[in-house]
Amino acid sequence: MTFINYAAREINCKIVYYGPGLGGKTTNIKFIYEKTNPNAKGKLISLATETDRTLFFDFLPLDLGEIRGFRTRFHLYTVPGQVFYDASRKLILKGVDGVVFVADSQAARMEANLESLRNLELNLKEQGYDLRAVPYVVQLNKRDLPTALPVEEMKRQLVFKGEPVFEAIAAKGNGVFETLKTIAKMVLLELRKGR
Amino acid sequence: MAGADLVLHDEEYQKIREVITRLRGECNAKVVFLVDKNGQQIAAEGELEAIDTTALASLAAGNVAATDSLARLIGEKEFSILFHEGERDNLHISVVGGRVILVVIFDERSSLGLVRLRVKKGSAELAAILDVMMKKSAAPRKAAAGGSPFAEITDEDIDKLFSD
């Protein structure tokens, strides 16, 4: 749900990074924070446990510049990936404009990816969204690990509507901005369509 | 997609500002702040220099969302007011019209009783303005004054955002 503020001439969009625990959602946001010009970003907020596991959400506001005289701002959120934080995940999805699914490439985490994807679909549905209609991209993270599954195999299991797929090593920044740019474009194109 | 986009026009914005400016005076508050339940800042008045308003908006919305869920867990519809007491400053958070969050930051120059009383009155006024805002948001965008500027967005416009 985009917030269009004619008074302040701003468009505000919300992008949520979803995926299984320890998949690299927070790492994506942290990399974006580190590499973004200070004028274009706000404070990075992490509601995390003492061991740095996301407890509620991470939040990063980005200002991408003007489009048709409107300041374009994106609010990036991550959800807590661990299964038992489901109640919190649902809350973060409220008002979402686009979703990035960060999948863990390790073979042993494929089941967790699939479970998280099912969970995403269900939680979106509860908020009145259809995953098939929401701007959506998949990121295959941790491509550098020796236990990573082949890309084609992951696509076969995870891709369901021809959504864009990016290979990434979020800890090094590979694929992070490509993913963000693509989801941001998809959200803006959705805005162009109107309703 | 779920729900309409939220659209704030200048007319409603000015009315909202009028109400929250007055409310701030009546409460003797440092800051009065209005934020959408999804975490988008709508309007703010007061001593804002030292406050990261974007973060405040996001955290207030997260706080209300979590508290709403807690309420439902124990069989309540909602907890309509949240109050956080600090050593110097206090936060009074309330939900207006089921959709928007009103945050009042105040110190010892005011009191919880005064804030509660004034917020109650101000909320009714804000709810009426928000009602109009929601109706306008739900109407097809073409009907809005001047039409939608976004129908004309080109791929080039979008690419420019990412040029550096």
Image (cartoon, coloured by chain):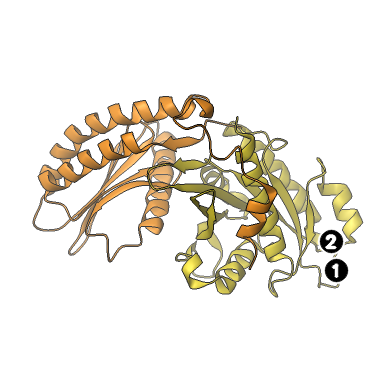
Chain colours: A yellow, B orange
Relative placement, left or right, of B60 versus B144 is left
As displayed, is residue A163 above or below residue B143? below
Residue A20 image-quadrant placement: bottom right
Residue B108 image-quadrant placement: bottom left
Q: Point out the image quarter for the N terminus of chain B.
A: top right
Q: Chain of mark 1?
A: A
Relative placement, left or right, of B143 versus A142 is left
Q: Amino acid at mark 1?
A: Thr
Q: Amino acid at mark 2?
A: Ala
Which one is earlier in the sequence, the residue at label 1 or at label 2? 2
Between marks 1 and 2, how big is the CA–CA gap? 6 Å
Q: Residues within 10 Å of mark 1 (few under 14, many from 20)?
A: few
Mark 1 — residue? A147
Q: In this rendered view, identify the residue nearer to me: A184 or B70.
A: A184
Q: Position of residue A191 (x, y in %)?
A: 60, 40
Q: Position of residue B151 (x, y in %)?
A: 60, 37
Q: Residues within 10 Å of mark 2 (few under 14, many from 20)?
A: some
- Say which residue appears at 63% left-offset and 45% top-offset: A187
- For label 1, the SS is loop
Labelled pair 1, 2 in contact (Cβ < 8 Å): yes
Mark 2 — residue? A107
Q: In this rendered view, identify the residue nearer to me: A124 or A98.
A: A98
Q: Point out the image quarter for the C terminus of chain B.
A: bottom right
Relative placement, left or right, of A93 versus A153 is left
Q: Chain of mark 2?
A: A
- Is residue B124 among the parts visible in the rendering? yes
Q: Position of residue A194 (x, y in %)?
A: 60, 33
Q: Position of residue B53 (x, y in %)?
A: 35, 57
As displayed, is residue A81 above or below residue B20? below
- For label 2, the SS is helix
Q: Are marks 1 and 2 on the same chain?
A: yes
